[in-house]
Image: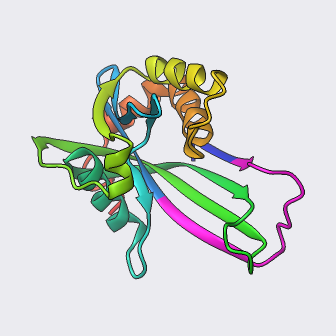
Amino acid sequence: MLFEHQIFHAENLNLAGRAFVRIAARAIILKDDSMLMIYSPSCDEYKFPGGGVERGESMEAALVREVREETGSIVNRIVARVGQIIEYDHPKERQLELFTMRSSYYLVTVQAEQLELELDSYESDLGFTPRWVKVDEAIRLNEATMASGSAQLTRWITRDTWALRQIAQNYPALLGMVCSCTPEEAVR
């Protein structure tokens, strides 16, 4: 894997305590010098397409579904799992002691055809819009948003900005993986 990282959103977390664990799949979609990201005008930030794995769903099926819902794109191929970020925070549920989010990042290719978005209500409220953007531009915007101290900062901006930095450092290699991978080598 290209990267593994942990983020602690709070101090004094009981890592051995009763936890709610959310598993998520996130897509890295590259084309030439840009990548397909989700822009939120209400938060003024970029995030990776992706989201939680539903009960009984495989990681790969969740990835394909989330890309389709949030970008309107159809996944051609899952090239490789390239990273994982685990986040820890206090849970919303009083009976639990820990919230854990395990996000796996997958390099994927998509068809050129675009379908209609199928956003959840909170995604629509945040104005989720798929955009092709240069990695450095996405990093700059997210860093500026974080530096602004806005009260509307999302939990995922720290995670996805960290992942964007890793992708920026390894962009030529990742793009090479997309261009050189045969269907037989792709993760199914």
| Image height of 117 relative to 139, above or below | below
Residue that sits furthest to the right in the current view: 12
Residue 153 horizontal/vertical position (percent): 58, 37
Query: Which color scheme did the rendering employ for the protein?
Result: rainbow
Q: What residue do we see at 29% from left, 37% from top?
A: 129
Quarter location, residue 109:
top left
Give the quadrant of the C terminus: bottom left
Q: In this view, does 71 lie to the left or right of 50?
A: left
Q: What residue do we see at 31% from left, 48% from top?
A: 124
Residue 120 horizontal/vertical position (percent): 32, 58
Q: What is the magenta range?
A: 6-24
Residue 180 seen in this snapshot: no
| Image height of 153 relative to 65, above or below | above
Task: Judge whether residue 12 is colored magenta.
Answer: yes
Q: Is residue 77 left or right of residue 8?
A: left
Residue 69 seen in this snapshot: yes
Residue 84 horizontal/vertical position (percent): 59, 51
Nearer to us in this view, 173 or 52: 52
Q: What residue do we see at 90% from left, 57% from top?
A: 12
Q: Is residue 94 left or right of residue 85?
A: right
Residue 74 horizontal/vertical position (percent): 19, 51
Report the number of numbered marks: 0
Q: In this view, does 175 lie to the left or right of 111?
A: right
Q: What residue do we see at 29% from left, 49% from top?
A: 70
Quarter location, residue 159:
top right
Nearer to us in this view, 101 or 113: 101
Task: Judge whether residue 107 is colored magenta.
Answer: no
Quarter location, residue 14:
bottom right
